[in-house]
Amino acid sequence: MTFFIESSIIDEKRITNRLRLKVLWLNKGLGFAIDFIVLHKTYPLTSYYFWPQSQAWEQLKFELDCKPGITEVQRIKILNLVSEIMSVWKTSKNRTISETLLNQFSDVTFVKLKN
């Protein structure tokens, strides 16, 4: 199938989509949401799920399992990132986002809330 976008022809097989994990790093927990990115446009794929107040990992897994077009590799990568970030947050004495954290999780978007 071929799409016509802005006077260009784009072959459907060459369109790459990706998922982006967004994280709210809070003093009392974490918020996780996933965006779907295709053709340089971002679309929210999930709502925010807050951990440890809810079972965020399980809720994200359920949502990813229900969405067509998301590969197993994408699901595993996102869920592994969620697990790693939860682990870092649990062991972190300082509840602020450091440069080290940003570098460690460069594929993740950390959302900063204004005070």
Image (spheres, rainbow, N blue to C red):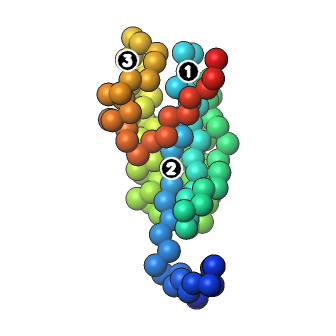
The tag on residue 91 is 3
Residue 28 coordinates in the image, percent (x, y): 57, 16
Decide if residue 58 is in sight here. no
Q: Mark 3 belongs to which amino acid?
A: Thr
For image coordinates 56% across by 29% down, the residue present is 112
Residue 68 coordinates in the image, percent (x, y): 60, 66
Q: Is residue 74 above or below residue 106?
A: below
Q: Mark 2 belongs to which amino acid?
A: Arg
Q: Quadrant of the N terminus?
A: bottom right
Q: Is residue 89 above or below residue 47?
A: above
**Mark 3 / mark 1, whichever is N-terminal:** 1
Give the quarter of the image for residue 48: top right
**Mark 2 / mark 3, whichever is N-terminal:** 2
**Mark 2 / mark 1, whichever is N-terminal:** 2
Q: In this image, 114 relative to 105: left or right?
A: right
Closer to us: 12 or 9: 9
Q: Secondary structure at mark 3?
A: helix
Residue at which label 2 appears = 20
Residue 111 coordinates in the image, percent (x, y): 55, 33
| Circles 3 and 1 in contact, beta carbons < 8 Å | no
Depth check, mark 2 against mark 3: the one in front is 2
Q: Secondary structure at mark 2?
A: strand
Q: Is residue 114 above or below residue 20?
A: above
Residue at which label 1 appears = 26
The tag on residue 64 is none
Residue 107 coordinates in the image, percent (x, y): 41, 45
Depth check, mark 3 against mark 1: the one in front is 1
Q: Marks 3/1: CA distance?
A: 14 Å
For image coordinates 51% across by 54% down, the residue present is 19
Q: Secondary structure at mark 1?
A: strand
For image coordinates 64% across by 47% down, the residue present is 46
Disc 1 crowd, CA 10 A, few/some/many (<14, 14-19, 20+): some
